[in-house]
Amino acid sequence: KKLIIINGPNLNLLGKRETNIYGNLTFMEFFDTVKEKYPEVRLEHFQSNIEGELIDKLQEAGFSYDGIILNAAAYTHTSVGIGDAVKAIETPVVEVHISNTFAREEFRHQSYISPNAHGVILGFGLQSYELAIQSFLYNSSGF
Ligand code: DQA
């Protein structure tokens, strides 16, 4: 399986940013561990703070990869453009959030991604990404 994790704005600061919410690990530390754990997966990672670059990457991966794991971060709550891109592509997108956005401010309860996502996983810390990977690996029989 060929999967890509696409991370939006400020997720390059994981490990230093609001560590009480997002934890102490950098994304790269986490990513290296998860790659070792799932050697059968061709797992890539892309991060950008720029909305249009995220849309370009979704379009690029969206017709050739087996799955996209998308944490659009703050753009989740604002970007019609990213929502439309998720709708336009063929590859299934699993929306991921590190924190439980429903337990936080009201403006984080709205998502432009969810209506077009294959599924949503949130609130499990960085493990949310791993659960998303598993959803692409173990989904054929329904269990
Ligand atoms: C986030 C939640 C968003 O509301 C926030 O803007 C982020 C990270 C998460 O993974 O918990 O930057 O997507």
Image: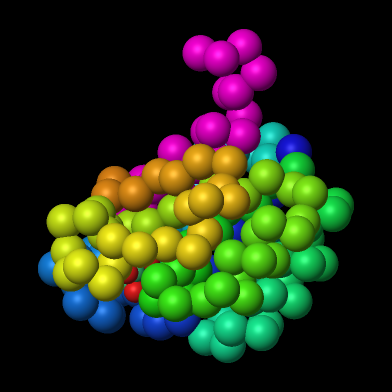
Judge whether residue 138 is colored magenta: yes
Q: In the picture shown, does residue 23 fall above or below 120?
A: below
In the rendered view of the protein, which quadrant contains the N terminus? top right
Q: In the picture shown, does residue 48 fall above or below 44?
A: below
Q: Residue at x 79, y 49 (%)?
A: 90
Quarter assignment of residue 85? bottom right
- The mark total stands at 0
Frontmost residue, 97 versus 108: 108
Point out the residue furthest to the right here: 64
Q: Residue at x 66, y 66 (%)?
A: 84
Q: Residue at x 58, y 87 (%)?
A: 50
Quarter assignment of residue 126? bottom left
Frontmost residue, 104 versus 69: 104
Left or right: 116, with 126 as reference point: right
Q: Position of residue 102 (x, y in %)?
A: 23, 55
The range drawn in magenta is 125-143
Left or right: 3, with 37 as reference point: right
Residue 11 in view in this figure = no
| Rendering quadrant holding ligand 1 | bottom left
Left or right: 85, with 31 as reference point: right
Residue 83 in view in this figure = yes
Judge whether residue 22 is colored magenta: no
Left or right: 135, with 129 as reference point: right
Frontmost residue, 16 versus 119: 119
Q: Residue at x 52, y 76 (%)?
A: 79
Q: Position of residue 75 (x, y in %)?
A: 46, 76
Q: Position of residue 49 (x, y in %)?
A: 52, 86
Q: In the picture shown, does residue 9 fall above or below 117?
A: below
